[in-house]
Image (cartoon, rainbow, N blue to C red):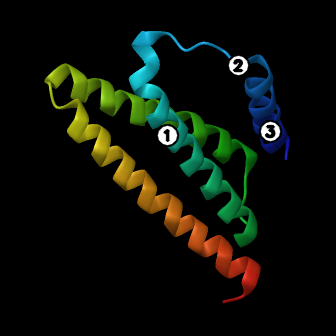
Amino acid sequence: MIAVLGLLGGIVLGLLVKPDVPAAFEPYLPIAVVAALDATFGALRAFFDGIFDDKVFVVSFISNVLIAATIVYLGDQLGVGGQLTTGVIVVLGIRIFSNAAAIRRHLFHA
């Protein structure tokens, strides 16, 4: 529960402060957001499955963001950044929709 409150607090703080993102990090921000959404939807699904763990959520959240950003960075260094970015978005998008479907089944028993 503390992790969820921290996440909500971070979102509110980010909306109020409106931090500037350095130009060097701008290509990685969308990937980081999608990776964070994947971890958040996974945590919500785990909550409905009755297996949610704060520590697992925090580790998943941070590792998803770092791994996705690293893959995109390596793609940029290899000259295939767009292709790896698309791959990361597709994989994380599939996971997000899969988790959203499971959440919907829990909420609507369908």
Q: Horizontal placement of 18 versus 85: left or right? A: right
Q: Eyeballing the image, is 102 above or below 55?
A: below
Closer to the eye: label 1 or 3: 3
Q: Return the residue at label 1.
A: 64
Residue type pointed to by label 1: Asn
Judge the density around disc 1: few (<14), some (14-19), many (≥20) Cα neighbours within 10 Å.
Answer: many
Closer to the eye: label 1 or 2: 2
> Residue 35: x percent and y percent?
50, 42
SS assignment at label 1: helix
Q: Return the residue at label 3.
A: 8
Residue at the (70%, 71%) spot, across then down: 49
> Residue 24: x percent and y percent?
40, 11
The quadrant the C terminus occupies is bottom right
Using the rendered image of the protein, determine whether residue 21 is visible from the camera's viewpoint: yes
Using the rendered image of the protein, determine whether residue 50 is visible from the camera's viewpoint: no
Residue type pointed to by label 2: Lys
Pick the residue in front: 54 or 94.
94
Q: Which mark is residue 100?
A: none
Q: Which comes sooner in the sequence, label 1 or label 2? A: 2
Within the image, what quadrant is residue 94 found in? bottom left
Residue contact at pointers 1 and 3, CB within 8 angstroms: no
Q: Horizontal placement of 77 versus 99: left or right? A: left
Judge the density around disc 2: few (<14), some (14-19), many (≥20) Cα neighbours within 10 Å.
Answer: few
Q: Return the residue at label 2.
A: 18
Q: Residue furthest bottom?
A: 110
Judge the density around disc 3: few (<14), some (14-19), many (≥20) Cα neighbours within 10 Å.
Answer: few
Residue at the (72%, 88%) spot, across then down: 109
SS assignment at label 2: loop
Pick the residue in front: 27 or 49.
27
Pick the residue in front: 14 or 66.
14
